[in-house]
Amino acid sequence: MQELNRSTANVKTYTERIIQFGEGNFLRAFANWMIHEMNKKANFDAGVVAVQPINQGLIKMLNDQDGLYTLYLNGIKNGKAISEHEIIDCIQRGINPYENYADYLANAENPDLRFVISNTTEAGIAYNADDKLDDAPQSSFPGKLTALLYKRFQVFGGASDKGMIIIPCELIDNNGANLKKIILQYADDWNLGAEFVEWINEDNIFCNTLVDRIVPGYPRDKMDAITAELGYKDNLVVEGEQFHLWVIEGPESVKEEIPAEACGLNIVFTDNQEPYRTRKVRILNGAHTSLVPVGYLYGIDKVRESLEDEVVGGFLKDAIFNEICPTLDLSKEELEQFSNDVLDRFRNPYLEHALISISLNSTSKFKTRVLPSVLEYIKRKGALPQHLLFSLAALIAFYKGDRNGEAIAIKDDQSALDFFAAQWATGDISGVAKATLANTDFWGVDLTQFEGLEATVTENLENIINNGMKAALQAFVK
């Protein structure tokens, strides 16, 4: 069977305009797919040079396939379950700077280079005081990038049009701003001069971003069938879901250089990403967290199955559209579209998410993902969000550690486990509710101070414990 490479595949080559730190599954299923789409549909002509950010990686394997790989996108698309695949050809070559540092640094001399993309894990955007300019390479990603930018500054004499648009994808808040801060720290440490600092500040754009696509990665258990389907050998097959979202915070000029709109890509250009980050946490993550104790105690094990159940699925939809969305500031149209996308993602037949695996550290997740919606709803509506409070009661019941006579493998901080064990040992349901709601270590606030909240949660908790989740939820949704 033939190997996948540029001599066996009918693909294009592109001008090297992007340097990318990271060659893993996420970037190849996310950013590289979008670049591929813009190359096909909008003549973006953007080739990628992939840089291996750590000593161990996939660059050799990538180069063996001339930068090519097959991407499978699986999920709900236009209301239908679809699995589709194609060869992605935007990566032109890969570089391992630990073996070929000179080749890495030579990218600075490319006049066409315009964009930097990265995904070096959450720990990748970090300062390392031991990094030096003459290291080959620097150990940290920001150190490597600083050396490249300084070389570019020198080669082109600080020309303003040779600055870069830097779009990190690491999952930390204000990733672009934090990366810039570290680069300026290295500029100071390495005495790179005021003119370089000015060039960084004036001629390079550091974008904060929000990225969203589930990428299961390499489908090891399905590769025999996939290889038979493809008719060629590909060691870098990657799977992703159909949904994608890339929020890029930056000046209007960034949007003008990236032809996403012409390709129908879900890339949002904005001067403030916070409403989108809040939307994701409250709706996507908040829905997950709200669903877990309700669905699991109801007797359901998977997220998809929860949506397929009329009672549980209806409960979740009501919570999202009637209690979470009204607490957010984006347009109703945007919020409803995103919510429907979330429900489609939950229904994805190609992904199986176990509710019990999502239950890890549920108390802290409820605090960050759901409680803000509860408090904002009370503030805006002057009423209690009944579905979200039912979920809170279900969460307290979940920590009792019993589902229809079977022990639940709860995973949380030991202090949380000890607290609930002690409370449930009393057998006093109203006392458990009161103590949990008043626990400021959990919530950062005493929830019993909100009028009617304790009574509502207590009533729901009593119904769940005394009658079982099925009967309690069915009575609730009527």
Image (cartoon, rainbow, N blue to C red):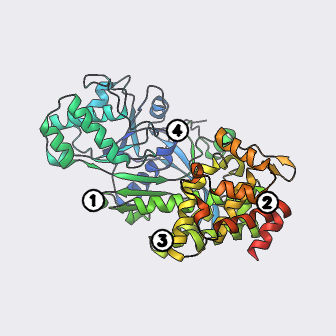
- Proximity of marks 1 and 2: CB atoms separated by less than 8 Å: no
Give the vertical position of 52 relative to 14 (above or below): above
Q: Nearer the viewer, mark 2 or mark 4?
A: 2
Q: Is residue 192 left or right of residue 466?
A: left
- Camera-side residue: 179 or 478? 478
Depth check, front residue: 172 or 266: 172
The amino acid sitting under disc 3 is Glu
Q: Earlier in the sequence, mark 1 or mark 3?
A: 1
- Mark earlier in primary sequence (3, 2): 2
Q: Is residue 7 above or below residue 325?
A: above
Q: CA distance from mark 1 to mark 3?
A: 21 Å
Q: Nearer the viewer, mark 3 or mark 2?
A: 2
**Quadrant of the image occupied by residue 342:** bottom right
Which residue is under mark 4?
4
Q: Badge 1: how crowded within 10 Å, few (<14), some, or many (20+)?
A: some
Query: Residue 298: which numbered mark, if any?
Result: 2
Labels 3 and 4 touching (C-beta < 8 A)? no
User: Which element carries disc 4, helix, strand or loop?
Assistant: loop
What percent of the width, then of the height, locates residue 190?
A: 21, 28
Which amino acid type corresponds to the residue marked 4 in the rendered image? Leu
Question: Percent position (x, y) of residue 389?
Answer: 66, 65
Q: Quadrant of residue 339?
A: bottom right
Residue to which mark 3 is pinned: 334
- Whole-Å distance between the Cαs marked 4 and 1? 39 Å
Please indicate whether residue 260 sits to the left or right of residue 452 in the image. left
Q: CA distance from mark 3 to mark 4?
A: 40 Å
Tag 1 residue: 251
Residue at x-position 13% and y-position 44%: 159
Tag 1 and tag 3, C-beta contact below 8 Å? no
Secondary structure of the residue carrying numbered label 3: helix
